[in-house]
Amino acid sequence: MTTDTTSAKRGFHFKDITKMFGGGGTSSLRQFGILGSLIVIIVLFEILTLVRNGPNGATLTSGNLINVINQYSFILILAIGMVMVIIMGHIDLSVGSVAAFTGIIVAKSMTDWNLPWPLAILLGLAVGAAVGAWQGFWVAYVGVPAFIVTLAGMLFFRGAQQFIGSAQTIPVPKGFQIIGTGYLPEVALPVPFNVPTMLLALVAVAWLIVWEIRTRRVQHKMGSETAPVWVSVVKVVLLSIVVIAAAWMFATGRPGTSFPVPGLILLALVIIYSFITSNTVFGRHIYAVGGNRQAARLSGVKDRWVDFFVMMNMSMLAALAGMIFVARSQASGPNDGTGWELDAIASVFIGGAAVSGGIGTVIGSIIGGLVMAFLNNGLALLGQGADVVAMIKGLVLLFAVGIDVWNKQQGRPSIIAFMTRQFGSKKDPATETFDPQANYPTSQKYEAPAVDETRGK
């Protein structure tokens, strides 16, 4: 307990700033590279659009932020499932085709079969689960590499989508469009903002306060080093300001708009999957199998079962992403889902996932996805063509992964992965160390049980 008391009473030290989000003494400012890059990108495009457009920038406006959420929510949803696949050491190339395949089935079920849209959504999720079970079976129980299985799935389900839809556009009813174009409802109060959006922000701020208090109590109970109180206060205040400011922009946009329904779905999924990967047995098994499959198997982890459900979960999220896109587009078309798998994979790797598996977080992947989203959005606002956007995205992906790999080759911890691990989970820094060779936290590493050499003698 001495360390905690000392850290709480001592005066200002610059290194305390590095604990703002890391929570441990080994944190450094370099570990926040992805979040810092996102902030720099947003500020840079705000300045560039300010210079280009005159008195106001175009990036940090209500309309633009709403557009970013609406246009890229389905990619961020794919990134949530993809990070789990990549942690396991797999890759899924079929998500775009599965999303398009689900979209056409759901659209035809409402148009041709007169299925009510809530039931059509359930049908879409069931289709995603069936596709994921099919691909998971080949990966987990037959042993075909996921790259091959999902490459086959990408070809098959793309063809199936065009076969079912006859390469035509199928419209969807207005009720279904809510999940892609809806907003939080208005409340008849004499205030110049959307009340539900601001209430959602207040709930988020309350959660930040409770989470920080809970984290400090856990660290104190375990006798680990705790950042000074002023660090926690500044962190909560800064995050609260960001949340309130963002909510205000969403709540004061053009009449009839507020925080988008796709953003609500994304937010709920981020919370659920962050909890699953960080605080459940299944989540620990994902990291264990991805880090050292043989050791995990010897420790009793059913790695085939984990493979199966991770692949099935990915396809279900792809189905959901496809339905959101169709709802936003108001129709299912033959080119839906093209290239989505590449954006999702890029988001995960930019967000700090290790190529070899065993490392990655949901929060890091969302930040990586937002980097890609604001790059696309900012370049579009500046009038750049798709060719320039593709080249810049490729360079960003290459440098992000290259720097990460280079650091590990030099015998240093993976900066990006360590940063995202800190963001995604508040582990005890006194007990959690980093093994740069294994590429994942040693607290999540499964060791094989000791063998009794006297048995059988």
Image (cartoon, rainbow, N blue to C red):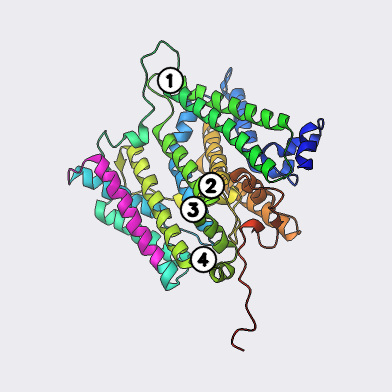
Residue drawn at x 37%, y 46% is: 320
Q: Which residues are magenta?
A: 113-137
Amino acid beneath label 2: Val
Pinpoint residue 435: horizontal percent, then vertical percent: 70, 59
Callout 2 touching callout 4 (CB < 8 Å): no
The answer to whether residue 151 is magenta is no
Pinpoint residue 228: horizontal percent, then vertical percent: 74, 33
Q: State the separation of the CA atoms marked 4 and 3.
A: 21 Å
Label 3: which residue? 82
Label 1: which residue? 195
SS at circle 3: helix
Most foreground residue, 258 or 200: 200
Label 2: how many Cα within 10 Å (few below 14, some 14–19, many 20+): many
Visible residue check, residue 168: no
Q: Is residue 317 left or right of residue 248?
A: left
Label 2: which residue? 362
SS at circle 4: loop
